[in-house]
């Protein structure tokens, strides 16, 4: 025992010698604002992303990078952006924050990427924002609706993409208040930023209608207790701020206990095609077969990109063309479209950064506010805002799993500002003309 | 699970007695040598490889702790990730809430917090054995990370806690990751000196006696329960330190990182490296980091589709585990040992 105390003393002394300052104190090391063109060569631009290709968030979300890759292939086959082909490196982090930190460091240090584009998930991506900003790596179009990405002072390199959860919650809340006045409302939300920020928006409108709040953890796939509690409280409208797997689980659990509320689902978990696939899959594992059309009919969701079923939309038609050429075996879902629009938007920013892109130039292009494109609501990008899409429309799923818009696009802010209809014109694929053939 | 392994360390004991240097000094010198090797390695490799070397470091101390518990004392723990979880959150909370604490204090407290949890777990574990013990520790690994959702404001919920640790004194022109790698290995080697001293001392003999035959150990005057609890304590201190170092290195502590799969892979690393051998812990830790990396690179080179590519690391790891256990039941270290003995016998044969 005497020996180990000598050893412990030694440990303490040695560590004391190596680190004198407080571990949590900032040493004032500021931004490495130096402009750099790491990852850009004469004919390529290397970019990277972290995606959940395995793990709890993989069902549904693993297809996003497939969509993005198809668009990059299309861009490359069209001659690239200003003559440079995009080399897209996808790292699987399994939705595990430790892995995210490792793979992002791998992308930055080993693969020497120019930018991280579309890193997916709040618990995962929040762990690399400080690192990317202190290294001066552009961190563009984060695949999460957390409010944290919109912080130009502390994270000047980071830009959001999807509509944030609070804006979306406000639009959902207003719709529920207008349409289901006097009905009992229940919340079913993920126990993290998704749930918290969505409720901040919902509560501005339906707080006095809410009779029950239930949460879920993505690690636990049994949601029957929560759905039973919603049923017991008599909730007639259930607002579901869930990832796709948990929207599907909630629908199945409700069906099992004979509960038929009106589901109102956030855009992150309301893609009909992805949901149909998951419903079939989960039901099959449970030894049952279900009609996903029947289960999904009438479900209300929010969105900001055109629905893949709206084939007359010029952007849907454009991306369908890319899909059919490069990834015909993947079902063409809104989730795939999400990745395609993201990749296309990065392509626009890279093009706007000019013939000799640098990290600073691409960040300036992002915040110029000039990016217009496939979304039905505008981006919030400017010098003072790094918010992605600023609003949403409301849709209802038809029995054939197509969707019908039941409230046109509206925009709002992340605070308590009003919700206003948006009627801006979108540029068409021909007008943007990303790849001139 | 209590495979009786005569660890190589015990065999060289008589030879060492003839030396005049006290064992502690020998171990400290060996650690200093190892640190010099690590520093040299980090200087000739790029920054990302530095990160992998540092990762091997914190896995090494976690696996070494588990080796002491499972290989030397015969207690199977399926929940060692829980102690890493405690260590990681201790560092995270200290860095965020008490920023003036120096890093060494954070790491010592992380080890202490792990040890405290180990003491409690050990007290319960001393009454259990075999599958019941395994089940109880597994419950720890499954249940503990859920605490973060119970106290979302304090522990950050599912998102966990992110922070930046400032450890590099101003004016040292070493890349951040390289510096962190040195700190990780310095801490790990110092802890290993303690572990090796324990393993080779009286307590280590008690551990092995309890593992081999509890009744016989009790009859020779060893307090079996207390010995088991001590093994848990030392092992959990190592786990806590490993978690603390991981948090320091990656600047994150989140429940999604401490799944039961982590605990299981630590145990697999113990078996793969060589049950009951501290050198085996090193091979196990290297395997944890590099098999994953190599199979990913392999998948990249072969252009496999993502479904195959993502399961390849697990499959490769499983196949290697099966092959190693079939060919060398005492793990990689046992294989080295046999190879060494074989070479010796060839040399002897040649001379004769």
Image (spheres, rainbow, N blue to C red):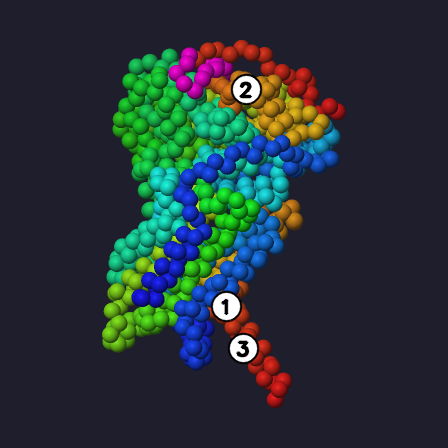
Q: Secondary structure at mark 2?
A: loop
Q: Is residue A250 magenta?
A: no
Residue under label 1, please give it. B333
Q: Quadrant of the N terminus of chain A?
A: bottom left
Residue A271 in view (yes/no): no
Placement of B347 over or under B148, stated as above or below: below
Placement of B313 over or under B219, stated as above or below: above
Residue range corresponding to the magenta coloring: A401-418
Q: Where in the figure is residue A386, as x and y percent of width and height?
A: 52, 24
Q: Quadrant of the C terminus of chain A?
A: top right
Cα distance in 3D space between marks 3 and 2: 70 Å
User: Share a chain, discs 1 and 3?
Assistant: yes
Q: Residue at x 38, y 18 (%)?
A: A173
Cα distance in 3D space between marks 2 and 1: 59 Å
Q: Residue at x 62, y 35 (%)?
A: A114
Q: Residue at x 40, y 73 (%)?
A: B22
Provide the chain ID for the residue under circle 1: B
Q: Where in the figure is residue B99, as x and y percent of width and height?
A: 38, 40
């Amino acid at each position: 025992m005497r020996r180990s105390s000598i050893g412990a003393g030694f440990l303490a002394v040695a560590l004391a010698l190596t680190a004198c300052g407080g571990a949590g104190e900032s040493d004032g090391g500021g931004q490495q604002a130096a402009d750099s063109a790491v990852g850009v060569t004469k004919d390529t631009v290397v970019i990277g992303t972290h995606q959940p290709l395995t793990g709890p968030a993989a069902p549904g979300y693993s297809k996003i990078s497939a969509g993005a890759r198809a668009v990059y292939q299309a861009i490359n086959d069209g001659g690239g952006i200003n003559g440079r082909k995009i080399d897209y490196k996808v790292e699987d982090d399994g939705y595990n924050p430790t892995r995210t930190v490792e793979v992002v460091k791998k992308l930055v240090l080993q693969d020497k990427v120019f930018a991280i584009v579309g890193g997916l998930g709040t618990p995962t991506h929040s762990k690399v924002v400080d690192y990317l900003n202190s290294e001066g790596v552009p961190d563009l179009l984060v695949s999460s609706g957390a409010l944290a990405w919109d912080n130009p002072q502390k994270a000047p390199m980071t830009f959001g993409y999807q509509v944030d959860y609070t804006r979306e919650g406000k639009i959902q809340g207003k719709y529920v208040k207008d349409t289901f006045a006097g009905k009992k409302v229940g919340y079913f939300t993920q126990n993290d930023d998704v749930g918290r920020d969505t409720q901040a928006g919902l509560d501005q409108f339906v707080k006095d209608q809410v009779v029950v709040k239930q949460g879920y953890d993505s690690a636990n796939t049994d949601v029957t207790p929560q759905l039973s509690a919603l049923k017991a409280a008599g909730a007639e409208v259930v607002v579901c701020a869930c990832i796709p797997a948990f929207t599907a689980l909630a629908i199945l659990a409700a069906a099992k206990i004979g509960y038929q509320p009106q589901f109102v689902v956030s855009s992150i978990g309301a893609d009909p095609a992805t949901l149909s696939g998951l419903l079939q899959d989960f039901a099959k594992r449970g030894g049952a077969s279900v009609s996903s059309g029947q289960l999904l009919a009438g479900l209300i969701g929010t969105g900001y990109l055109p629905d893949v079923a709206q084939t007359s939309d010029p952007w849907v038609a454009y991306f369908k063309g890319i899909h059919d050429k490069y990834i015909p075996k993947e079902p063409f879902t809104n989730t795939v479209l999400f990745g395609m629009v993201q990749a296309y938007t990065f392509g626009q920013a890279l093009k706007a950064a000019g013939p000799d892109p640098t990290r600073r130039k691409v960040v300036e292009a992002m915040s110029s506010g000039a990016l217009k494109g496939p979304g039905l609501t505008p981006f919030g990008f400017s010098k003072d805002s790094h918010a992605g899409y600023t609003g949403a429309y409301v849709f209802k799923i038809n029995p054939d799993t197509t969707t019908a818009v039941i409230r046109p696009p509206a925009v709002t802010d992340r605070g308590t500002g009003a919700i206003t209809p948006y009627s801006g014109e979108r540029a068409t694929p021909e007008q943007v003309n990303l790849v001139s053939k | 699970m209590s495979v009786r392994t005569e660890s190589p360390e015990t065999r060289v004991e008589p030879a060492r007695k003839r030396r005049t240097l006290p064992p502690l000094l020998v171990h400290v010198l060996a650690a200093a040598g190892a640190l010099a090797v690590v520093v040299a390695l980090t200087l000739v490799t790029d920054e990302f490889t530095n990160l992998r070397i540092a990762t091997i470091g914190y896995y090494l101390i976690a696996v070494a702790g588990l080796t002491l518990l499972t290989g030397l004392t015969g207690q199977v723990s399926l929940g060692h990730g829980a102690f890493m979880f405690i260590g990681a959150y201790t560092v995270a909370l200290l860095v965020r809430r008490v920023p003036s604490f120096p890093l060494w204090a954070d790491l010592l407290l992380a080890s202490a917090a792990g040890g405290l949890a180990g003491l409690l777990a050990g007290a319960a574990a001393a009454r259990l054995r075999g599958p019941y013990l395994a089940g109880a520790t597994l419950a720890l690994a499954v249940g503990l990370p859920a605490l973060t959702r119970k106290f979302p404001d304090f522990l950050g919920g599912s998102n966990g806690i992110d922070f930046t640790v400032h450890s590099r004194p101003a004016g040292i022109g070493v890349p951040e990751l390289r510096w962190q790698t040195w700190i990780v290995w310095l801490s790990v080697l110092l802890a290993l000196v303690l572990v090796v001293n324990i393993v080779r001392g009286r307590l280590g003999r008690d551990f092995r006696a309890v593992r081999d035959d509890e009744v016989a150990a009790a009859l020779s005057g060893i307090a079996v329960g207390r010995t088991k609890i001590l093994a848990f304590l030392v092992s959990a201190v190592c786990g806590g330190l490993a978690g603390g170092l991981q948090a320091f290195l990656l600047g994150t502590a989140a429940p999604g990182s401490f799944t039961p799969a982590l605990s299981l892979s630590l145990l697999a690393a113990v078996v793969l490296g060589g049950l009951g051998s501290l050198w085996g812990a090193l091979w196990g830790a290297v395997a944890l980091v590099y098999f994953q990396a190599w199979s990913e690179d392999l998948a990249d080179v072969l252009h496999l589709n993502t479904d195959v590519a993502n399961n390849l690391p697990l499959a490769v790891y499983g196949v290697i585990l099966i092959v190693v256990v079939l060919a060398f039941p005492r793990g990689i270290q046992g294989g080295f040992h046999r190879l060494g003995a074989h070479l010796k016998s060839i040399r002897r044969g040649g001379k004769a």
